[in-house]
Structures are given as C-alpha cells and as structure tokens.
Amino acid sequence: MCPSSRHTYLECDEATLARTPLLPGEAEEDHRRREMSFLNPRWFMQTLLAQRFRRMLDDAQAPIHRFLDREKAARFLAQPKDYGKPWFGQLMAGPQMLAYFLQVNAWMEDYGLQ
C-alpha cells in the first residue's frame, strides 16, 4: 500500500500493478480492467478517504470533533502503513474507520446535531 506523500502516484501504481493477479490468455482490455480493479481499493479509495477525512478535521464546524482526538487522528493519517491494522479489536481496518467517521459526521450534519 502506498497512499502517502512520500510516494508518487506512479510509484504506487507500478508497485501495486506488479502484484495484480494475471490470467493466462487474457485479452489486453480485460487485463487492463483487472489492473484498474486491483488498484482501486488498494490505492485510490484509501487516498480519497484520507483526503476527505483531512478536510473534515480541518473544518472547525464539523460536529464529529466532539468525538475525535484530532492529534491522534492526524498521527494515524500520517502513518498509512497502519491502515490495514484492525482498530479496537474490530473487523474494520483503517479505511473502514475513516469511512465510518465520515458517515457519522454526515449523519450529524444532516440531522443538525452539534
């Protein structure tokens, strides 16, 4: 996994593509689709979630702030190697945790909870 500022997209892309499972005799178009499907959850979605989470942390009006330790959240975002580790003994790992907090924040905004 590469979603970090220390790596460029191309470096992450190449490292992840090298791990894409191949099927013998697969057409080039199908092979490219397989590569894109392999890249998406392993790189793009995690990066997108992290960016949205950072924006939420920077928004002083976000209602979720009452439930988050901003320093710990920022430290977590700075260590993408920890994204695959379960949190609080749950089945969810880092990307799922980020998505969970984004959803809770959206729910709180939708219902006007502060």
Image: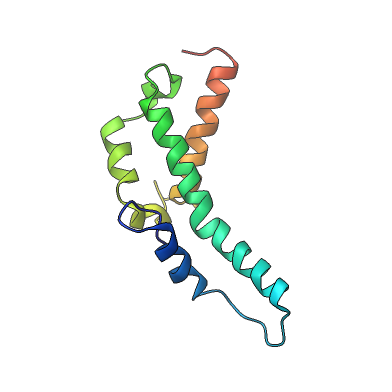
On the image, the x and y values in percent for residue 40 come to 57, 57
Which quadrant holds residue 111?
top right
On the image, the x and y values in percent for residue 47 come to 46, 48
| Side of 18 relative to 58 (left or right) | right
Instruction: Give the colouring mode of the picture.
Output: rainbow
The number of callouts visible is 0
Q: Residue placed at 38% from the left, 58% from the top? A: 8
On the image, the x and y values in percent for residue 96 come to 50, 46
Which quadrant holds residue 41?
bottom right
Q: Residue placed at 49% from the left, 57% from the top? A: 43
Tell me if residue 92 can be seen.
no
| Side of 106 relative to 84 (left or right) | right
Tell me if residue 6 can be seen.
yes
* Rendered view: 103 above or below 37: above
Which quadrant holds residue 107?
top right
| Side of 98 relative to 23 (left or right) | left
Q: Residue placed at 35% from the left, 53% from the top? A: 4
Quadrant where the N terminus sits is bottom left
The single residue placed furthest to the bottom in the displayed view is: 24
Q: Residue placed at 30% from the left, 30% from the top? A: 69
* Rendered view: 103 above or below 31: above
On the image, the x and y values in percent for residue 34 come to 65, 69
* Rendered view: 82 above or below 28: above
